[in-house]
Image (cartoon, rainbow, N blue to C red):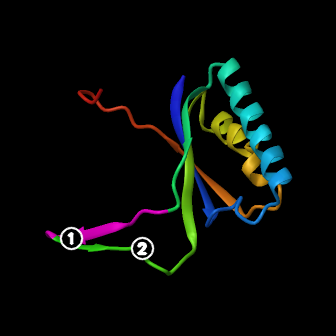
Amino acid sequence: MKEFMLIIRTQGDHLEALPAEQKQRHLEKVMNYMGGLLKSEKLNSAQPLEMEGTIISGTKGKFKDGPFNETKEVIAGYFLIKANNLQEAIEIAKANPVFEDGTDARIEVRPIKIMAGIN
């Protein structure tokens, strides 16, 4: 099995505008989703990310820090999963409840590149 990183991108805090009951239902859906991945031994780890942070970019020792306002998109969280191949990882990502409840989300699915000598 290969490891894949599912990077969840949303327009700001995608749960902020939801009423409390809908937030609770969404949380229950996410916990059920994660429970299924754990039961099938597909989930290594997952966490939401805080909305604060910055972007640092640079070349030749000169750095700039953000945030940059070109977009309101943020990385809201991640899942580190196991899947047999990219297609299975995509199907796992498509089942994520972040796509429900009217949220405008994207999930980037990336294979983990294994390099000798790291971990």
Residue under the point 79% across and 39% down = 29
Above or below, comparing residue 38 to residue 74 in the picture:
above
Q: Does the rendering let one see residue 63?
A: yes
Residue 66 in the image: state x and y as whole percent. Answer: 37, 74
Q: Which mark is residue 72?
A: none
Taking the view exactly as shown, the residue that stands out farthest to the bottom is: 70
Q: Nearer the viewer, residue 115 or 53?
A: 53
Q: Which residues are magenta?
A: 52-61
Residue under the point 24% across and 70% down = 58
Quadrant containing the N terminus in the rendered view: top right
Residue under the point 43% across and 77% down = 68
Q: Nearer the viewer, residue 31 or 82?
A: 31
Q: Is residue 60 magenta?
A: yes
Circle nearer the viewer, 1 or 2 = 2
Kindly identify the amino acid type of the residue bearing the numbered disc 1. Thr
Q: Is residue 118 magenta?
A: no
Residue at disc 2, secondary structure: loop
Above or below, comparing residue 52 to residue 37 in the picture:
below
The residue labelled by disc 2 is 67
- Report the label total: 2
Q: Does the rendering let one see residue 6?
A: no
Taking the view exactly as shown, the residue that stands out farthest to the front is: 20
Residue under the point 79% across and 38% down = 28
Quadrant containing the C terminus in the rendered view: top left
The residue labelled by disc 1 is 59
Residue 16 in the image: state x and y as whole percent. Answer: 70, 63
Kindly identify the amino acid type of the residue bearing the numbered disc 2. Pro
Residue 101 in the image: state x and y as whole percent. Answer: 83, 56
Q: Quadrant of residue 13?
A: bottom right
State whether the magenta stretch is mostly helix, strand or loop. Answer: loop
Residue 109 in the image: state x and y as whole percent. Answer: 58, 46
